[in-house]
Image (tube, rainbow, N blue to C red):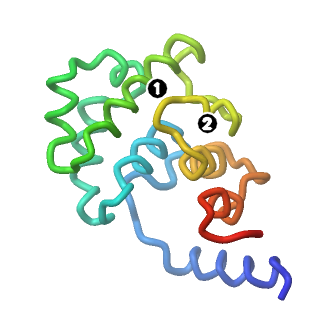
């Protein structure tokens, strides 16, 4: 079976059945990044209120970079794995200082940020920036789950 024969039905199914999520359809790389990190080992329904609260308090990369740690950890409370949010803040500081406060579009540049691995970099590049060369299969295969 050719890859295109699999992709077309999946895309159609997604368009017909996708859930309404607060981070989706915003063309906002920051929202994509925050949601991808929050969704690691956490159910979508559990993340929704945390995402809304986090974005309300820290609406952009600069506010994340400058947030006091106590407030940051309080906003993350209940999601666990606090290193995820600490890494996000370190990455936000790098983005603020080295990329003028805008997440880079380039997959390799995204990978260089603390706490961003191949799957998250692929999600940001493809969802927020429409990067077509980064596919779901490439991201998953880099995790050694499948080989393409």
- Please state, as top left, top right, bottom left or bottom right, where the N terminus lies in the image: bottom right
Which of the two discs, 1 and 2, labels the residue nearer the N terminus?
Answer: 1
Residue on which disc 1 sits? 91
- Residue at (58, 13) in percent of width and height: 98
Q: Furthest-front residue in view?
A: 144
Give the quarter of the image for residue 143.
bottom right
Left or right side of 115 for 16: right
Report the label total: 2
- Residue at (30, 60) in percent of width and height: 42
Residue on which disc 2 sits? 111
- Residue 51, percent from left and from top: 29, 47
- Please state, as top left, top right, bottom left or bottom right, where the C terminus lies in the image: bottom right
**In the image, residue 71 above or below residue 25:** above
Give the alpha-carbon distance from disc 1 to disc 2, as whole Å. Answer: 10 Å
Q: SS of the residue at dot 2?
A: helix
Left or right side of 115 for 65: left
Q: Furthest-bottom residue in view?
A: 1
**In the image, residue 55 above or below residue 5:** above
- Residue 96, percent from left and from top: 49, 16
Classed neighbour count for the residue bearing mark 2: other residues with Cα under 10 Å, few (<14), some (14–19), many (≥20): some
Classed neighbour count for the residue bearing mark 1: other residues with Cα under 10 Å, few (<14), some (14–19), many (≥20): many
Q: SS of the residue at dot 1?
A: helix
Q: Furthest-right residue in view?
A: 2
- Residue 110, percent from left and from top: 61, 34
In this orientation, which residue lies closer to the viewer: 114 or 37? Answer: 114
In this orientation, which residue lies closer to the viewer: 105 or 111? Answer: 111
- Residue at (73, 77) in percent of width and height: 7
Give the quarter of the image for residue 73.
top left
- Residue at (65, 44) in percent of width and height: 125
Q: Which mark is residue 52?
A: none
In this orientation, which residue lies closer to the viewer: 131 or 144? Answer: 144
């Amino acid at each position: 079976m050719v890859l295109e024969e699999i992709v077309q039905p999946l895309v159609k199914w997604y368009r017909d059945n996708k859930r309404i999520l607060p981070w989706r359809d915003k063309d906002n790389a920051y929202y994509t990044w925050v949601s991808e990190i929050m969704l690691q080992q956490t159910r979508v329904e559990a993340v929704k209120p945390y995402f809304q609260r986090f974005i309300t308090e820290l609406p952009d990369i600069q506010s994340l970079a400058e947030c006091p740690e106590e407030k940051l950890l309080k906003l993350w409370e209940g999601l666990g794995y606090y290193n995820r949010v600490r890494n996000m803040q370190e990455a936000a500081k790098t983005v603020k200082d080295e990329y003028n406060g805008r997440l880079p579009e380039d997959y390799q540049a995204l990978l260089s940020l603390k706490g961003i691995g191949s799957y998250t970099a692929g999600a940001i590049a493809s969802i927020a920036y429409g990067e077509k060369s980064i596919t779901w299969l490439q991201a998953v295969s880099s995790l050694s789950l499948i080989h393409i």
